[in-house]
Image (spheres, rainbow, N blue to C red):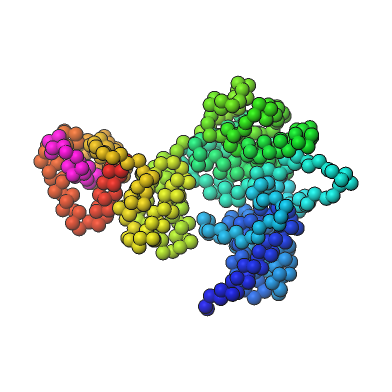
Amino acid sequence: MAFDESKAADLAAAWGRISDRLRAELGEDLFSSWFARMEMEERSGSKLIVSVSTQFLRNWVQSHYLDKLVSLADAELGGIQDVQIRVRTRGAPVRIVRSEPRRGAPRAESISPAPAATPVQSKPAPQPVAKSADPHPKPAPDIDRGTPLDPELTFDTFLLGKSNALAHAAATRVAEATIDAPVSFNPLYVHSASGLGKTHLLNAIAWRIRELQPQRRVLFLSAERFMYHFITAIRARDVILFKDQFQSVDVLLVDDFQFLQGKTMLQEFLHTFNSLVDSKRQVIVAADVPPTQLDSIDARMRSRLAGGLVVDIQPPELELKRRILHARLVESVKRDPSISVPEDVVEFIANRVHGGGRELEGALIRVIAHQQLVQAPMSVDLAASALRDLVQNADVQRIKIDDIMRVVGRHYNVAKADLLSPRRARSIVRPRQVGMYLAKRLTSRSLPEIGRRFGGRDHSTVLHAVRKVEELLQKDEQLQREVVLLTKLLEQP
């Protein structure tokens, strides 16, 4: 069937109107949390098919808003009797078909509903503030509205490795603890460089508690949002209400704590923090640095923050970087089946790109885009060209035999001690021969010197290894790719 652009445009326009009505009837907060990532897929007779990014989001919308969706879709499109909600392939692009908020309406990203996990139907949806008898009402500092949670940031989507295992375990313990059986540490303080998963874990904790213990009130606030509400309370001359609103919170999650500034602001947070911890309410804090390096706060605050469990997230190890790249690649291929990235290119990106998931995903996108633009075969050379300004590349790089043994050993999963040993197992001999070949080709060392460095071997052994690898390279495409990859890894440290 030919693609009908006119029909698609009509559906998109209708979805924009449906989104406007959802926003108007439910309020910006609930709309941004549950419908901002929903997409219209197609209409099939009397059925409208839409999609969301996660199973959790699908279940929630279907349980609480399906009738409203059917009603609004029928009003806009006519003849709609059912709305089917599908779960998009994880990582599929989000078109977010929505109209701009009307003038005077708050921006979608500004606030979210309280992550109180009582079902939405049991609590009236936020409505526009009704006109008061007072002609000049004061704005209420409503901290009941926290920072929006991201439905895609759950424990299910968190890739686990050695570098983040402790933080993940602590976060899971907090998320699954109950009022009757709380964890023994409070607060939980998670720190790491930007982009390594702190915000992901805080979102995951909030979602898990809402799933397992919907009666508990969870509030997720960025430091910026805390400051915004406090300033609003001061301007409204109602700081007492601001303080009181925290008393009903069971779990408080504060992200980007390092951005909390100002003596009065910090004192107020300390009072709030002490009140919650002293009353056995759980607090989770995330920041870029450990408590001892928070220069903006006083010793008392640093002591209280360090008095619970302090865990860090390290940059991902090589194996985790491979898994992150493979996960992102699977998502990319599902969006565009024509994408094909060989394993040696994935390995090159994992070895050469420093940082966390954001940097790795950005590098992969860059390599794919570069290949599609230049219409050249996907290869390590192409990846190196695409990422040349992202990798640390010295103007003059002197390759050392120790570097060769390290890179070869890591690639073939062989210990350096085995490369130097007299063992003749095939799983060790081939990497050893490749290492000798690379040493001969990439360094100025003599055959006797290479032999000595590879466990005291004779120069004739090195010569045999070099000739053996050269012979195999004439017919073994897999070995050709491995040698190209290893060479690039050594030339671009």
Q: Quadrant of residue 170?
A: top right
Left or right, 337 with reference to 157: left
Magenta span: predominant SS is: helix
Left or right, 255 with reference to 193: right
Residue 373 point in image, percent of width and height: 38, 60
Q: Quadrant of residue 368?
A: bottom left
Left or right, 352 with reference to 453: right
Residue 152 point in image, percent of width and height: 57, 51
Residue located farthest toward the right when viewing the structure as drawn? 133
Which residue is found at the position 53% from the left and 29% from the top? Answer: 290
Residue 98 point in image, percent of width and height: 64, 60
Is 168 above or below relative to 384?
A: above
Tally the marks. 0
Residue 126 point in image, percent of width and height: 76, 50
Residue located farthest toward the top when viewing the structure as drawn? 299
Which residue is found at the position 30% from the left and 39% from the top? Answer: 394
Which residue is found at the position 75% from the left and 58% from the top? Answer: 25
Is residue 214 at all visible to an observer of this figure? Answer: no
* Stretch in magenta: 429-449
Which residue is found at the position 46% from the left and 53% from the top? Answer: 328
Q: Is residue 447 magenta?
A: yes
Q: In front: 325, or 457?
A: 325
Q: Is residue 53 magenta?
A: no
The image quadrant where one finds the C terminus is top left
Q: Quadrant of residue 175?
A: top right
Is residue 96 at all visible to an observer of this figure? Answer: yes
Residue located farthest toward the bottom when viewing the structure as drawn? 1
Q: In front: 292, or 320?
A: 292
Is 150 above or below relative to 70?
A: above
